[in-house]
Amino acid sequence: MRHSHRMNCTAASSWAKSDPCVRETYFHDLLNIDSSEADLIKSTDALYSKMSRITSNLGGIFEKVWGMAMLQGDADALRVTGLMAVWLRPLMKGLPLDTPIIATHSLVGLVAVACGFTNVINLIIDNHAQWFVVVPGALNLCQGPVNYQKCLRMGIKAENLQLVGHWIPRELVDNISTDCLRRIGRAKSGYGQNDGPKKARRVLIPVGGAGAQRKFIVEFVRALGPLVKSGDVQLFLNAGDHKHMKSAFLSALDSIGVKDFDTVGTAEGVMRFHDRLLHPANEPNANVTLFAFDDYFPAVATTDILSRVTDILACKPSELAFYPVPKLMIRRVGDHEQYSALRAAELGDGTLEAREISDAMCNMDLFVGGCDFLTQMNESIMKNNEQGIYDGCKNAVKLALERANKA
């Protein structure tokens, strides 16, 4: 829950901070306030994360029931969230009511509306329309046309809804052409008439905020073992701030006999790693690099930073499904996420969801066994960028400023 929404908030903030028309930008994290109201959100988030972990690891009927529950964000769910928002108003009191608010979770948007803010924009998450993610009284923005159409069919008025594109940080969007061309060069090296040695495929595997993918990810890392040891794959493992995932990664690496790997645990270390790999001739010091942190802020930022230097982002179809990076979509946590994987596959910048390890490895065979699959995805990303597919946060900030100027 928390990682995806903070990533979206970071993305929106990156555009606002670089806009000369914006005087100040505040990253207002309701969870980071020492108060009973914030504790209420934390306890709700903790319950969600715990249930996601338990059901994902148990699988079977438990996973199915939890997955179906994630599709039930109906009008009653919105009403309950709206009532909760009334109790959370102290978290936003004190700010001028004409302050433009860009909410990356519907609860934040509902709190802002309940407080009386006059310029509230809600970034609708996922690619599955349900009332739970909508904020009445705000301008609701969608990432894709299917979600936009379904929101209209639900009854949201057109004047309260716009299709704007994906929630992506400015650093990634501004460098799409540079990064994609570098990936294509790496992918083609050693194939056909292209000079140079074949390049290892860099695979970034981040863990979501709930830390709910341990079983699948550990099995996936083990399955990648032979490719890692042969030098065909390099792994960037982001355990985030989940100690249990750091332990799980270490156990998995030990089980496949990988003893030589790097560990990065600071934001400064992540930036050094990133800066070094931006040069096409440089490679990581080891075939596996483990990123693990004590705090969630560098944990969230690391995936954004490493997205520029990885070849493949292997992740569940959360908000990362919308990122302008070639993606291997692995097993979802909640059935609402399946539609985000479809969005990526139809745009050509990601695979269909691989629900089994065998499916994930079939995709890896395509990535590793030639250059065509990776080349196609990067070319699709560049074409998508020309159409403004990844400009959602840029457009959100623009709309917020236009509404403020009209007031």
Image (tube, helix red, strand yellow):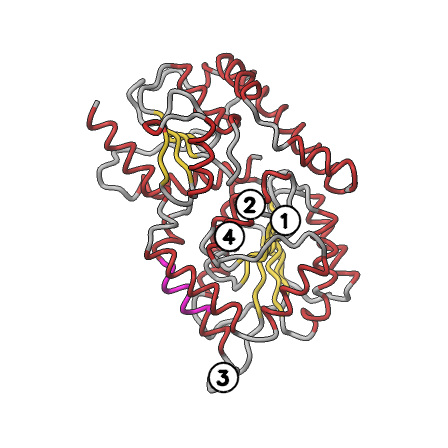
Q: Which residues are magenta?
A: 175-183
**Marks 2,1: beta carbons within 8 A:** yes
> Is residue 327 rendered to the left or right of residue 152?
right
Give the label on residue 239, or none. 1
User: How far separated are the C-alphas under marks 4 and 2?
Assistant: 24 Å
**Dominant secondary structure (helix, strand or loop) of the stretch shown in magenta:** helix
Residue type pointed to by label 3: Gly
- Indicate the position of residue 136 as horizontal and vertical percent values: 42, 21
Q: Residue at x 28, y 34 (%)?
A: 399
Kindly report the distance in space between the C-alpha atoms of the residues bearing marks 1 and 4.
24 Å
Q: Which residue is mark 4?
A: 344
Q: Residues within 10 Å of mark 3 (few under 14, many from 20)?
A: few
Give the mark nearer the N terminus: 3 vs 2: 3
Q: Earlier in the sequence, mark 3 or mark 4?
A: 3
Task: Please name the amino acid that badge 2 sits on.
Answer: Ala
Q: Quadrant of residue 229?
A: bottom right
Residue 299's tag is 2
Query: In the image, what residue occupies the spot 59% across and 38% down?
Result: 336
Q: Tell me which amino acid carries mark 1.
A: Ala
Specify which label sits upstream in the sequence, 4 or 2.
2
**Could you tell me residue 311's position as x and y percent?**
52, 64
Residue found at the far left of this picture: 406
Report the side of 57 relative to 156 (left or right). right
Find disc 3 in the rendering and name its residue.
196
